[in-house]
Image (spheres, rainbow, N blue to C red):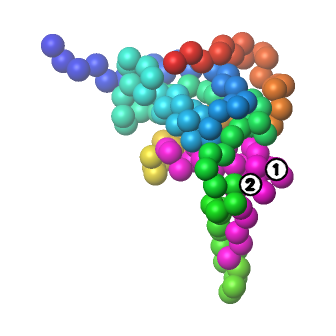
Amino acid sequence: MSTYMKNPQDVSRKWYVIDAADKPLGKVAAQVAVILTGKHRPDYTPHVDCGDCVIVTNAAKTVLTGKKATDKFYRHHTGHIGGLKEVSYGELLEKNPERLVKIAVKGMLPKNKIASASLTRLRVYAQGEHSQQAQQPEVFVK
């Protein structure tokens, strides 16, 4: 018996909703990364982008455990001399919680072309409302 390998044209995608309220950021990001890569499906194929689409709601109500809000920083460089910018995770959670969730999910995806294509299927909202009602998303149950 041979192993079944899925082809890119055979991929059918579903939409899932994950509520991040009162959940640790890392747990939510890990769950989203598994869905985006398609590892929750029985027909997972590593070299094919077979993941599903994810909507994360209530990103502003997610929880940072320990002292991550003050001690952990998101750093990026502008490309100019002395252009290192850093923002604490607590400040980022207050000002732009959608970006914080996307950064966490991006860090948990593999570093390849499939991961960058998977991130386009991620929608993050700070509040409980989302605009993807036409896709008929269902709540993801682990």
Residue 94: which disc?
A: 1
Magenta stretch bounds: 84-109
The residue singled out by tag 2 in the image is: 90
Residue 19 at what x, y percent from top left?
70, 26
Left or right, 58 with respect to 4, comes to: right
Q: Residue at x 79, y 17 (%)?
A: 133
Q: Secondary structure at mark 1?
A: helix
Graded by Cα atoms within 10 Å as few (under 14), some (14 to 19) or many (20 or more), the crowding at tag 2 reads: some
Q: Amino acid at mark 1?
A: Glu
Compared with 106, 77 (above or below) is: below
Residue 54 at what x, y percent from top left?
64, 28
- When asked about the image quadrant of residue 16, the answer is top right
Q: Nearer the viewer, residue 27 or 120?
A: 27
Quadrant that contains the N terminus: top left
Left or right, 47 with respect to 36, comes to: left
Q: Residue at x 43, y 20 (%)?
A: 41
Q: Nearer the viewer, residue 6 or 17?
A: 17
Q: Nearer the viewer, residue 105 or 2?
A: 105
Q: Residue furthest front?
A: 66
Q: Residue at x 50, y 45 (%)?
A: 108
Whether 56 is among the magenta residues is no
Visible residue check, residue 68: yes
Q: Amino acid at mark 2?
A: Gly
Q: Main secondary structure of the magenta part?
A: helix
Residue 13: which disc?
A: none
Q: Secondary structure at mark 2?
A: helix
What's the distance in space between the residues labelled 1 and 2, CA to CA? 6 Å
Do the CB atoms of the residues marked 1 and 2 lie less than 8 Å apart? yes
Q: Nearer the viewer, residue 45 or 24?
A: 24
Compared with 45, 106 (above or below) is: below
Left or right, 50 with respect to 91, comes to: left
